[in-house]
Amino acid sequence: MSEILPRLPAKCVGRAKKVCEEWLSCISSKEFVMMHCRHMCKGSRQKILSIGQESCFIRSTGVDLVDEKTMITLPFHVRPSDVWNLSSLKGLLYVCLRNTFEMLIWNPLIRSCINISDSKSYGFFKIYSDVVSLYIDSSNDYRVLHIKRGRFTVDVMAYSRRTSHWKRIQFLQKTHYHTNGYVWSGGTFCEDGLYFTVIQF
């Protein structure tokens, strides 16, 4: 399990979860995810997603490779140019649709997509005030952090991929960063922490 499974493509790993409970437990562990990412990041296994005005394709990297492109069909009904990539983590993309401002988690390699916007107005993105980031919590659950900033207020929600629910969380006690006088970058997940660049203007 430690030598073969981490070298399999993502789609095969997904199928392998159904073999038995032992494989499911192994594949779901944080250690396996890290091993799999290390193997996938070697040479020609790396992939680049390119989203243009009218087309979207994936290609492998590596100087020894012929430049082969695999065209993909978007799983949502918008033009490629109307898709904003807000955050990415371990092959998952967190995107916003320009026409509706709905947010989705998308895995282009296995053609999987879930819309995480709901009727309570969670999961809708405002370009000039909101900040989002993908991260993995201590229980190995993929989550989305969504910071919604207003005038001297901040509302922070976290979406759990495991439970498919939004939950309000406490975040950032220093209120002067809440104002629109600060520009925030998207978050970067590294070593169990989220990091943001915050610039005053």
Image: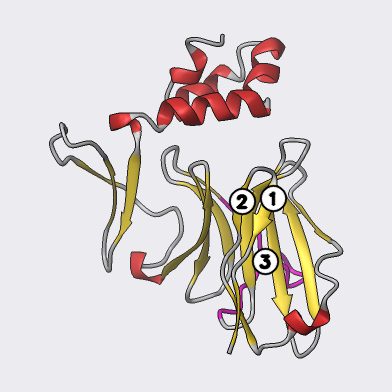
Q: Earlier in the sequence, mark 1 or mark 3?
A: 3
Q: Are marks 2 and 3 in contact (CB under 8 Å)?
A: no
Q: Main secondary structure of the magenta part?
A: loop
Mark 1 crowd level (few <14, some 14–19, many ≥20, 10 Å Cα) = few
Indicate the quadrant containing the N terminus: top left, top right, bottom left or bottom right.
Answer: top right
The image quarter in which residue 147 lies: bottom right
In the picture of the structure, the residue carrying the numbered disc 1 is 193
Q: Nearer the viewer, mark 2 or mark 3?
A: 2
**Which segment is the magenta one?**
114-127
Residue 38 located within the stretch drawn in magenta: no
Secondary structure of residue under mark 2: strand
State the mark number for residue 123: 3
Residue at figure coordinates x 72%, y 87% from the top left: 179
Identify residue type, mark 1: Gly
Q: Residue at x 77, y 39 (%)?
A: 138
Residue identifier under label 2? 189
Amino acid found under the numbered disc labelled 2: Phe
